[in-house]
């Protein structure tokens, strides 16, 4: 399994090195979206408006969104691309089984995801003047969010495997993801996917709050539960795709 | 010898269509089974079920005694070139593809690297090891697809149209390599529309028609059975009227080469009738796979 991880990691590095413009394009697009929203909000609030800590909180939410986005839609886009280019069936011939392979592939893709978010953070901090207090402990709630993101990604990947063309649905559901990441992480909202981890990370990064162990536990519980649901749905989708002959073709 | 791959009673339905009906196949070490059929006969559906990519509605597949649908580890023993697929990543180089697929098929990283280089060398792709696949010719891509199936040294190979679109030289090389792989003990299922390739490589022939295997037999016995007792005769020069009349009386057809339908004893009467005309060739007629295929599919 370690060798598989290394091979997947190496493959993701090769793509990064060989097609750096794809990463650059994503950095520019995602930075501009936030910057234009920021400019729009400042225009509406008037010339003397100060956002105070709220700017940092919104920026953290946005960065978490970009981070989760690639966890969420990476599998679906990968499945659609492989079905289209005709490598999906070969991937399914792995003796590891498709689910362990895609889990390892997700894990190996963390570096490129992290790099993307890091670059966007640098660009947006420079453009908006926001300052983020980065505590290493914040990685933990981010990981919890990521688990939930992968869970939702596997759920969406199930649809991609069965129906192939889910780009529109992915596009629309990105906004739902934005809501989940900006939602409060307490009360009934704690049951929503991603919300508890995102709220904790936001508090830590934007307000410099310390790591709350109980909130972190809740965040991981939430993330693992949604990952479990996603994997269950994906397993069902693999069975159905094999029964109906849907692995081939686009 | 125990079969490495065995399928029993495979049935696959897509809605109202029954694509495969009760297919039984066994593949033993060192043999090439040519699996032939017209478009839509059920070849690819069967290959997909054999490789664990398509779940049969009835029947079972055993790969070295294990069910690939329940136990994906069984796939460690299988390599496949799937028709209509690219089979490899176009944004990676041949070396990167082979290393990746080697590891994804269960090899250690170092082992995959070593084997990838050896295979690229053996198949004349060493020079292109670091060129992205999308820049390679169709023939090279197809060769790489075969190497991808071989990288983990599986015991069973499912090759769906492995020589499709190859130039003559590369097709011959691939044919030679497939023969060598069988000689080294691999069990190979070869699906192709190129009947001359099947005839050159196969030990056994199976023909599928409308989802059913309508014929399965050793190649030699099959061709002999379809050839029957036919002889072809050629003479050095033209046949005089009188001799021609004698030949016609014995039932000889054609105008040179002549065709005689009869057994070995009756042939002597034909040779007597031709005496003393100089003969160029007397040979027992052979059926080719194309003829067999057309007859079987035509009558099925």
Image: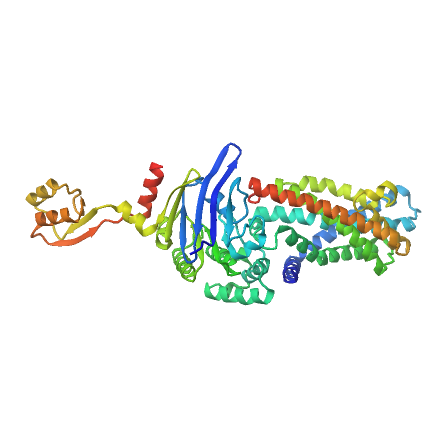
Residue A31 in view (yes/no): no
Residue B87 is left or right of residue A121, and the answer is: left
Residue A199 is left or right of residue B189, and the answer is: right
The structure residue drawn at horizontal position 57% and vertical position 41%, both measured from the top left corner, is A243
* Nearer the observer, B126 or B181: B181
Residue B39 lies, in percent from the top left, at 43, 41
Residue B82 is left or right of residue B32, and the answer is: right
* Nearer the observer, A193 or A35: A193
Query: Which part of the image, by quadrant, shows the C terminus of chain A?
Result: top right
* Nearer the observer, B240 or B295: B295
> As displayed, is residue B180 above or below residue A170?
below
Query: Which part of the image, by quadrant, shows the N terminus of chain A?
Result: bottom right
Residue B169 lies, in percent from the top left, at 39, 58
Residue B278 lies, in percent from the top left, at 10, 54
> As displayed, is residue B256 above or below residue B180?
above
Number of numbered tags placed on the structure image? 0
């Amino acid at each position: 399994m370690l060798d598989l991880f290394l091979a997947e990691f190496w493959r993701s590095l090769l793509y990064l090195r060989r097609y750096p413009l794809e990463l650059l394009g994503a950095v520019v697009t995602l930075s501009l979206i936030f910057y234009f929203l920021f400019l729009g909000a400042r225009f509406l609030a008037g010339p003397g408006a100060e956002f105070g800590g709220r700017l940092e909180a919104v920026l953290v939410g946005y960065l978490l969104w970009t981070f989760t986005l690639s966890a969420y839609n990476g599998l679906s886009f990968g499945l659609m691309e492989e079905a289209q280019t005709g490598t999906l069936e070969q991937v399914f011939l792995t003796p590891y089984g498709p689910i362990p392979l895609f889990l390892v592939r997700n894990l190996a893709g963390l570096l490129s995801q992290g790099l993307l978010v890091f670059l966007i953070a640098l660009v947006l901090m420079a453009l908006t003047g926001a300052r983020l207090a980065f505590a290493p402990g914040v990685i933990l709630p981010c990981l919890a969010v990521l688990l939930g993101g992968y869970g939702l990604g596997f759920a969406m990947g199930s649809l991609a495997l069965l129906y192939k063309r889910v780009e529109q649905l992915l596009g629309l559901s990105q906004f739902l993801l934005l809501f989940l990441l900006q939602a409060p992480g307490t009360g009934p909202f704690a049951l929503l996917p991603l919300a508890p981890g995102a709220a904790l990370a936001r508090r830590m990064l934007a307000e410099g709050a310390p790591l709350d162990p109980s909130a972190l536990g809740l965040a991981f519980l939430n993330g693992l539960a949604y990952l479990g649901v996603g994997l269950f749905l994906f397993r069902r989708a693999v069975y159905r795709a094999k029964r109906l002959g849907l692995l081939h073709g686009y | 010898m125990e079969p490495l791959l065995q399928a029993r009673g495979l049935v696959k339905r897509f809605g109202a269509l029954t694509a495969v009906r009760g297919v039984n196949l066994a593949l033993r070490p060192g043999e090439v089974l040519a699996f032939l059929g017209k478009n839509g006969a059920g070849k690819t559906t069967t290959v997909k079920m054999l490789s664990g990519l398509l779940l049969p509605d009835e029947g079972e597949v055993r790969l070295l005694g294990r069910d690939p649908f329940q136990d994906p580890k069984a796939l460690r023993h299988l390599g496949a070139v799937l028709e209509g697929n690219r089979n490899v990543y176009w944004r990676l180089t041949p070396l990167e593809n082979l290393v990746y697929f080697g590891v994804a098929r269960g090899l250690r990283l170092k082992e995959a690297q070593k084997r990838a280089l050896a295979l690229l060398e053996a198949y004349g792709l060493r020079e292109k090891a670091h060129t992205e696949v999308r820049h390679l010719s169709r023939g090279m891509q197809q060769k790489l697809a075969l190497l991808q199936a071989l990288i983990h040294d599986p015991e069973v190979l499912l090759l769906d149209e492995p020589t499709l679109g190859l130039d003559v030289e590369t097709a011959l090389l691939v044919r030679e390599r497939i023969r060598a792989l069988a000689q080294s003990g691999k069990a190979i299922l070869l699906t192709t529309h190129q009947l001359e390739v099947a005839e050159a490589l196969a030990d056994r022939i199976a023909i599928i028609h409308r989802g059913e295997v309508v014929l399965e037999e050793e190649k030699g016995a099959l061709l002999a059975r379809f050839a029957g007792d036919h002889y072809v005769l050629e003479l050095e020069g033209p046949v005089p009227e009188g001799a021609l009349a004698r030949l016609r009386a014995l039932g000889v057809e054609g105008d040179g080469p002549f065709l005689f339908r009869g057994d070995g004893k009756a042939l002597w009467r034909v040779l007597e009738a031709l005496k003393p005309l100089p003969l160029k060739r007397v040979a027992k007629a052979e059926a080719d796979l194309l003829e067999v295929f057309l007859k079987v599919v035509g009558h099925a």
